Amino acid sequence: MAGVFILFWIAGCIIPGVEDFYRKRLKRATELLNRHMSIGFTVPVVMLCHGPLSDTRSIVMIIIGFVLTGLFNTVLAYFLAFPVQCLLVRCDKQFSFDRDTDIENGDARRTTKLSKRTSPWIYPRHWALRNPALLLCWLFTLILGVPLRYSAQSDVVLSTFLLFSVWLTTLSIQTSIKHNPHLASCLRTLLSGLFNAVLWTSLAMIAYVFTDSAISNRPLPAMLDTLQTHTSLSTLIVRAASAPPPPTPDTSASTDSNTPIPTVTMTLAAGDIAISILNSGLVAWGLKLYEYRLQLLSRGGLTVCTVSAVLALADTVCGPLFARHVLGVAPASRALAFAARSVTIALANPVMAMLGGDAGLNAAMVVGSGIVYQMGLGFGVGRWLEGKLGEGAAANDPRVVAAGVTVGINAAAMGTAYLYETQNEAAPHAALSMIALGTMTVVFSSITPLARWIMGSMST
């Protein structure tokens, strides 16, 4: 992500027309990827079934620690970012709190958009025309996935099409609710928040795994292994490019027939495809950062990096200590998972590897935070935030910066994706804070004396 941002930024300074190329050729594809990248967060939730926590007390203590650290991070992120940005803006003397005109104009524009919406009574036909990919996914699930599952014992096709079918269905229902003029505003907000795509897709895939395990008499770990093989798309491409050519008939005849030729079969499962989409979306955020580069290369960017570094150090050190010595979370690997409880999964994995933390529990906390924030934003916090910020808010507005930092640090990619989807002004600050928090957490975890002290304190 950072590499893409730097590359486009340098190219934009040297080559004229780079921004026009992005807006005409890449922006729509980037926004489409932003809308669907959260499907990758369903996989860690399903994989929690691999190793359930054994005792009830550990589950309760982990939930308590998750809630308390989440509240602490939320409050600290906002009330650190807001005064720091106010101080920087006051020094710059470029900010004014008189924004009533902009808010009124934004509300008027939104009202005009709503008034132009019509309610066609031929809804099923319009819905089908707007969702061809959804209908094709369900069709392929029934005519390809189910027959191949029971005739060829192949789970990949069924699980892949089922995953995308449920995901697109939930998104379609959520979008229909958001734009339904026959529902009251509060009811639209409530129902759209309840139909969280990550939550319902995860539950549907968990139900599929348990059902197929019971029908086929296969153990649950074996079923979960068919859902994710940990093979990335880049690995397959590199392997295909570097694979040796097949032997010629003469060469094969001269080789020892008793010597077997080792072959390794690598395939993509449904979970691997979803994770690849997530990783692609994270990289594509570099283009969104380039789009909002003026906001980032300002005093707001300095505030984001400063607050993110402070919270990264606090989480890395205090998170495991609080979980271990205050809440009594055991074993130590579960307590160490709190060192990166808000870091996006792509950057949390190396932190868990360096500290010896429980990667599964850490992924569950990251995804859980994202779901809570996404549902909270859908339940009305997002609309309240838009009303407080107004449309076209200034890049250095402390309210914009503080809101972006709070969402980016606590909700990581899921919350940032929601802000980009709703075109909120705080989205670039959320993306930058997510990157800064993850990067600084990796940096602090790689400091050998600090990492040894944290791991040593788990046994005392």
Image: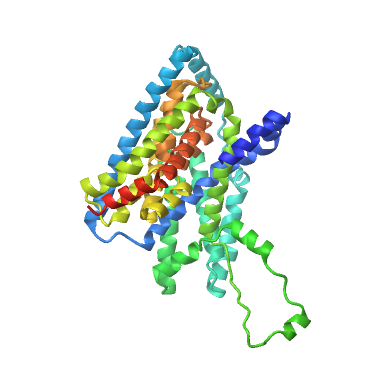
- The foreground one among 284 and 414 is 284
Q: Position of residue 54 (x, y in %)?
A: 27, 61
Q: Quadrant of residue 91?
A: top left
Q: Quadrant of residue 184?
A: top left
Q: Kindly give the residue lying farthest to the front in the view shown.
A: 449
Quarter that holds the N terminus: top right
Q: Position of residue 283 (x, y in %)?
A: 57, 44
At 57% from the left edge and 70% from the top edge, which residue is drawn? Answer: 148
At 25% from the left edge and 54% from the top edge, which residue is drawn? Answer: 459
Query: Taking the image as drawn, is residue 73 in sight?
Result: yes
Query: Taking the image as drawn, is residue 404 in sight?
Result: no
- The foreground one among 447 and 351 is 447
Q: Position of residue 333 (x, y in %)?
A: 32, 55
Q: Position of residue 270 (x, y in %)?
A: 53, 59
- 397 w.r.t. 144: above or below: above
In the figure, is residue 28 to the left or right of 420?
Answer: right
Q: How is the image coloured?
A: rainbow
At 22% from the left edge and 54% from the top edge, which residue is drawn? Answer: 57
Q: Quadrant of residue 50?
A: bottom left
At 54% from the left edge and 67% from the top edge, which residue is drawn? Answer: 146
Q: How many marks?
A: 0
